[in-house]
Image: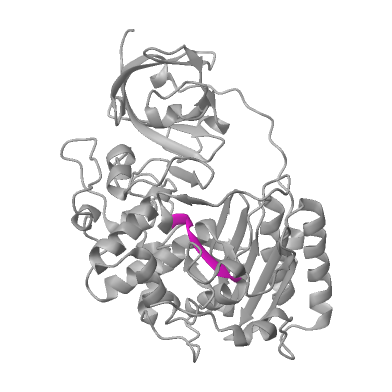
Amino acid sequence: MKHRPRLGITLALAATIVPAGLFGADELAPLKARILDALKETGVASISVAAARDGRIVWEEAFGWADRERMIKATPNTMYSLASVSKPVTATGLMVLAERKLVDIDKPVDEYLGGGKITHTEKGGRPATVRNVLNHSAGLPLHYQFFYADEPEKRPPMEETLRRYGFLAWPPGEVYLYSNLGYGITDHVISRVSGRDYVDFMRTEVFLPLDMTRTSVGIGPGLADFAAQRYDGDQKPIPFYEFDHPGASAVYSSAHDLVRFGMFHLKDHLAEQKAILKDGTIEGMQDEAASTAPEKNYAIGWGIEKNENGYRTVSHNGGMPGVSTELKLVPSENIAVCVLANGSHDRIYSLSEDILAALLPKYDKALKARTKPEEKKPVKYVPPAELLGTWSGRLRTYEGDTPLTVVFEPDGDIHLKLEGGMETLLNPLPNGMSVDKRILVAGVTPAQIPTADAAKHPHNAWIALRLEAGRLTGFAAAMNGRWSALSSYAVLKKGER
C-alpha cells in the first residue's frame, strides 16, 4: 500500500514552532545565530533542528537549501539521510518482533539467519547473540560498503555479504567494536522473521504507527521531492548511494518526525502515536547495565553518556558523505533534540549541545566550564615485550588464505608483509590501540588486501590485533575513499619467518 504524505500540514510545520513559555525569543536568537554561523563556516547546504520537552515540540526550524540546484528550501519536514541514527530506528523495529516473541535477543543470531550464517573462526567458540549484535559486542569486524548510482557495482544479497565478511574476529562479549554489519544483520533478521521486506516492515510497523509520515528506508515512493540532496565538501551534489547494511545507515527522516521518535523513546505517549513498544521495553533499550559490551556505553540501538555536562544522555549520531546527524535524549528532563544536515562537518554536532544549553541552565554552566583538553604530542609506539619478534600466520579472505607476517621491532617499528605484496610499515594509532583497551595494536598500512572486492579501488589496510592465549587474532580491513571497509580475518603465532 502506498502512503501519501499529509501535505495539509506542510506549511504550518515550515514555520518556527515555539509554544509560549517554553522556549522564548531570548533563547532562540543566539541559537539561530550559531546555526547561521555554522552554515557559513562549514558550507553545509542546510541545517534542520527540533527540540521537545515534556511531550511538546518547543522549537523546530530549518535553515538553508534542501536542494540548491532546484532552489528548494529546507523545512522541518524535509527528509534527511540519517546515516547511523538509523540504528536506534532499526533496533526499534527489531524490538517490536521481540515483544511479539518472534525474536529472543539472548539467543544466537544465527538461529534467525537462514542459510547465511556468521562464520565462527574458532572451533567450539560461543555464538553471538542478537543482543551482542545490537550493542556492538558480537566480535564482528569493521565493515561498511557503499554502492553509488554512478558506479556499476550493485548491492549484493545479505547472504553474500555474510559469506565474505560476516565472521567473528573475537569472542562475543569481549570487545566493543562499532559494527555497521551488525545492523545490516539486524535488518536481515527483521525481514526473515517477519516474512516481509525490511523497508515495508519498518513503514507499516514503526513509521506509520508513530505518525512518522516523512520517514522511510531510503527515499520512499512519492517522497523524492521532500528529500534533501547530499553534498560533498566542495558543495557538489553526491550521487545517490545505498549500502549492504541498510539497517545501519539507510533511513531518511525529517526533524519533525525524528524529534517525535525521540519523544516516543521518552515515553511521552503522544495522542497520534500508537504504543508499538511497552514502556519497559523502551527502558530496556536504554539500560547500559544489560549491555554485553565491556564498556557499557551502548545499550540497544543507543549510545549512553552517563555524565554529559551533568546529565545522563541517550543518543546516536551519524556521519557519512553528505550527512551529519544527531538525536539526543535527556530522560531525566524529558527532553529530545535533533540536528540534521545535508553536508558533512564536525561543527554540526556541537549544535545539539547549544540547544540543550539553552534549555538546561545546569548543562549550560557545565558546558561553559568544560576546558578544552590539551593536545597531546604524538608518542612513539613502544610494543609490549610479549609482542617483540616475528609473528607468522594467515589472512583468511573469502577467496582463500594468504600468508601474513608481522614483525615487532624494539624501536616501535612494525613490519607487515602479505605474500605476493611488498613489506610495509604499520602506523599505529594513538597509544597503539584505539578499538578496545585490550587490543594491543591497531594501525594503518599501505598493504593491499588480495581480494577482488578490495582491488576495485585504491586502499589502505586498517589492522586490529588482540593478543590472547599466545596468538594475535583480529582483522585487516581494506579502506578506500569511496567509503568501503572490507575486512578479512587475521591469525598469527610467534615464530620465525
Asked if residue 190 can be seen in this view, the reply is: yes
Q: Nearer the viewer, residue 20 or 203?
A: 203
Lateral position of residue 147 relative to residue 20, left or right: left
Residue 356 spot, x, y in % from top left: 68, 70
The residue lying furthest to the left in this view is 124
Q: Is residue 414 above or below residue 359?
A: above
Q: Nearer the viewer, residue 488 or 241?
A: 241
Quadrant assignment for the C terminus: top left
Residue 230 on the magenta segment? no
Q: Is residue 32 above or below residue 435?
A: below
Lateral position of residue 427 relative to residue 103, left or right: right
Q: Which image quadrant is residue 50 in? A: bottom right
Asked if residue 440 can be seen in this view, the reply is: no
> Residue at point 32% right, 8% down?
496
Residue 251 on the magenta segment? yes
Q: Is residue 323 above or below residue 175?
A: below
What are the residue bounds of the magenta stretch?
Answer: 248-254
Q: Nearer the viewer, residue 491 or 111?
A: 111
> Residue at point 75% right, 60% down?
369
